[in-house]
Image: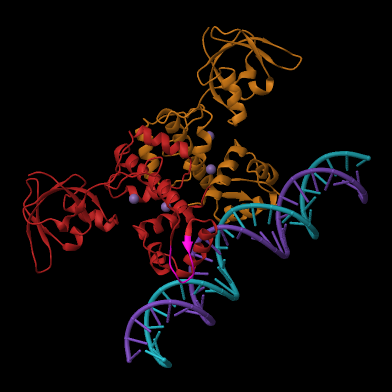
Chain colours: A red, B orange, C purple, D cyan
DNA sequence: AAAAATATTTAGACAAATCTAAAAAATTAA
DNA sequence: TTAATTTTTTAGATTTGTCTAAATATTTTT
């Protein structure tokens, strides 16, 4: 089966919103896609007719098994292209998402499988998110949120939860990227901000909000 | 300016059909795009409104200077992707066109210029067609049709005029590719077919029709 | 120079994807 | 448990790109 660009964007967004299979609401999805609830309802009917969605009106919705499969293949394309843009074409971290948003809709399966091979079957994209393989399998990670660390622990950034331009800009400004080693020096109970240290740079403070969007893995001191 | 996928396909087809600026007809373009004359008329009005086209009804049409610029940028994308698919992803000659037909509509200028650089600024695509540079300049070649050779002349295949699957399949079957050296052994006046010889293979005959679709360059004997 | 044939355009319809405004259902508050 | 609020759906338009059938213009033939 082949889906329109619009259908694909809906499927992908529902996948991200439903997480571990919670029901998604109409308003939530409308906001995510910068569209109107009425437009969402229209598309839900269409996706239900195509059996990609479990949906009864006023009851919320979530992807069917088939819908999840489709979502994973779109995400596979998106992340492989992001890897290509970053590693082969030397795009900056915060420029790749937008271009991948277009490339992900080119549907040739052979293209994607050949690209995967050419890139050496990468397991994670440049933001640290796992890349599904041909079968939709994704590598699992044992990452935790930066906010879960306690003072004096050291960890390595493994991915970011939020890939908005604002977020990526802020990370760049703070010299934080995938693989960066962070040591938590102090946690401030007042506003839950953290003082952290990176390499030989002077220690500095980041907000709870930012730390909540950074996943890390423990490393030995 | 940004154009829809459909608009881009029309612009590109008009560019190919008008060649050195002859007027294109509605039926001709409808056939090329596998659509109906009425649909063509509708799109012509739209492209004229956008000043991409010189068009007066019933009089035929051709691209404006701006239209040609747009056409060249689409062709640039198409051919760069074909080169990428062939050289980097090892796609076969006759599989690349279809995929490039989708990739060409991804419009990021930065993507294309970076891809161009990554590929080493190639001048010709895998079919031998010139790739326009950032400014729309295309390398000129001194190729002639295979049918223009006389008996005993030797030439090297530089491009093919027709890239249909049927054509590419036939070329492959006859061991003809870009760069292949061909010696014309005999020309038959009866049906204008040619007997040709390639490397150490036994000489064989090809139709006028096929020879009319192969461009060659002279080489010294 | 008519008549016939061909090419092109117009008229009207349709599917996909979106929107605004209004109605209906579900949830929350009084 | 009504009433108010919020969420979701329906109704009706709009835009883009396409189509068929019919009308009109142009070209070719007689
Ligand atoms: Mn992304
Ligand atoms: Mn997308
Ligand atoms: Mn091509
Ligand atoms: Mn195309």
Q: Residue A202 colored magenta?
A: no
Asked if residue B72 can be seen in this view, the reply is yes
Q: Position of residue B163 (x, y in %)?
A: 58, 30
Rendered location of residue A115, percent (x, y): 39, 36
- Magenta stretch, main secondary structure class: loop
Give the position of the C terminus of chain A as an image quadrant. Answer: top left
Image check: A146 left or right of B176?
Answer: left
Along the line of sight, the residue nearer the viewer: B22 or A202:
A202
Above or below — where is B175 with respect to A36? above
Determine the residue positioned at 48% across, 35% down: B79
Q: Is residue B184 left or right of residue B158?
A: right
Residue B134 lies in what quarter of the image?
Answer: top left
Seen in the picture, residue B129 relative to A97 is either above or below; the reply is above
Horizontal and vertical percent position of residue B76: 46, 38
**Magenta segment, which residues?**
A54-61
Query: Residue placed at 37% from the left, 59% from the top?
Result: A21
Q: Please name the residue shown 58% across and 49% down the image.
A: B53
Residue at position x 9%, y 67% from top?
A189
Count of picture labels: 0
Q: Is residue B56 visible?
A: no
Residue B86 x %, y %: 45, 29
């Amino acid at each position: 089966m082949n889906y329109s660009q619009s259908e694909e964007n809906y499927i992908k967004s529902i996948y991200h919103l439903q997480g571990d299979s919670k029901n998604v609401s109409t308003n939530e999805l409308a906001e995510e896609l910068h569209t109107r609830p009425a437009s969402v309802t229209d598309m839900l009917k269409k996706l239900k007719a195509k059996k990609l969605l479990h949906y009864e009106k006023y009851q919320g919705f979530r992807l069917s098994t088939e819908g999840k499969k489709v979502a994973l293949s779109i995400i596979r394309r998106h992340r492989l292209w992001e890897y290509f843009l970053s590693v082969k074409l030397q795009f900056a971290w915060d420029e790749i998402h937008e271009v991948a948003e277009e490339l992900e809709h080119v549907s040739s399966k052979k293209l994607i499988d050949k690209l995967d091979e050419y890139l050496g079957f990468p397991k994670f994209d440049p933001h640290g998110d796992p890349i599904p393989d041909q079968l939709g399998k994704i590598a699992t990670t044992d990452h935790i949120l930066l906010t879960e660390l306690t003072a004096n622990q050291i960890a390595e950034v493994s991915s970011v939860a939020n890939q908005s331009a604002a977020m990526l800009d802020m990370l760049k400004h703070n010299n934080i990227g995938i693989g960066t080693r962070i040591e938590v020096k102090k946690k401030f109970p007042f506003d839950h901000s953290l003082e952290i240290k990176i390499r030989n740079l002077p220690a500095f403070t980041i907000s709870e909000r930012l730390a909540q969007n950074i996943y890390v893995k423990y490393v030995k001191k």
